Amino acid sequence: MSESAPGLHLQPAVLSWMELFRSHAVIGMVINHEGLSDTFDAKTPLDWFEIGMNTSLAHWANHNHWTQHLWQWGQQVQFKTD
């Protein structure tokens, strides 16, 4: 993948975090579409991500080391700028 904006370099870890974001947004979109979320009526990918991530954390983070690891690692990801 090439640079998405001048001066913004996407590191491999950031690309992986974007994949994680996308997957959770899809989860949230399905949850919202099926009426399984009582949070709010999500309209954007960021809304869907919030539902997906909150749902994942609520159901799996305490029981699944892999999910915990991804969440903790994702919190440390930063964009590298010039």
Image (cartoon, rainbow, N blue to C red):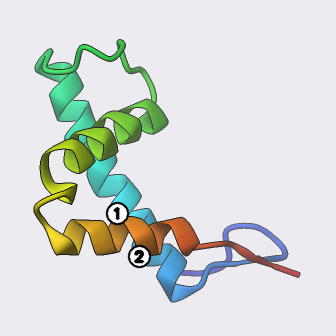
Q: Residues within 10 Å of mark 2 (few under 14, many from 20)?
A: some
Q: Is 49 placed above or below 67 here? A: above
Is 36 placed left or right of 25 in the picture?
left
Q: Residues within 10 Å of mark 1 (few under 14, many from 20)?
A: some
The residue identified by callout 2 is 16
Q: Please give the name of the residue rendered at 67% of the width and 68% of the height, measured from the top-left corner.
A: 4
The residue identified by callout 1 is 20
User: Picture quarter containing residue 52?
Assistant: top left
x%, y% of residue 16?
A: 41, 76
* Residue type for callout 2: Ser
Is 62 placed left or right of 11 in the picture?
left
Q: Please give the name of the residue rendered at 17% of the width and 29% of the height, measured from the top-left corner.
A: 31
Q: Please give the name of the residue rendered at 33% of the width and 71% of the height, measured from the top-left corner.
A: 70
Is 47 placed left or right of 7 in the picture?
left
Is 12 placed left or right of 36 in the picture?
right
Proximity of marks 2 and 1: CB atoms separated by less than 8 Å: yes
Q: Quadrant of the C terminus?
A: bottom right
Q: Farthest residue toward the right? A: 82
Q: How many marks?
A: 2
Indicate the secondary structure of the residue bearing disc 1.
helix
Q: Is 50 placed above or below 24 here? A: above
x%, y% of residue 75?
A: 52, 65
x%, y% of residue 11?
A: 59, 85
* Residue type for callout 1: Leu
User: Picture quarter containing residue 81?
Assistant: bottom right
x%, y% of residue 39?
A: 32, 17
How far apart, in angstroms, are the residues tagged by discs 2 and 1?
6 Å
Q: Farthest residue toward the bottom? A: 12
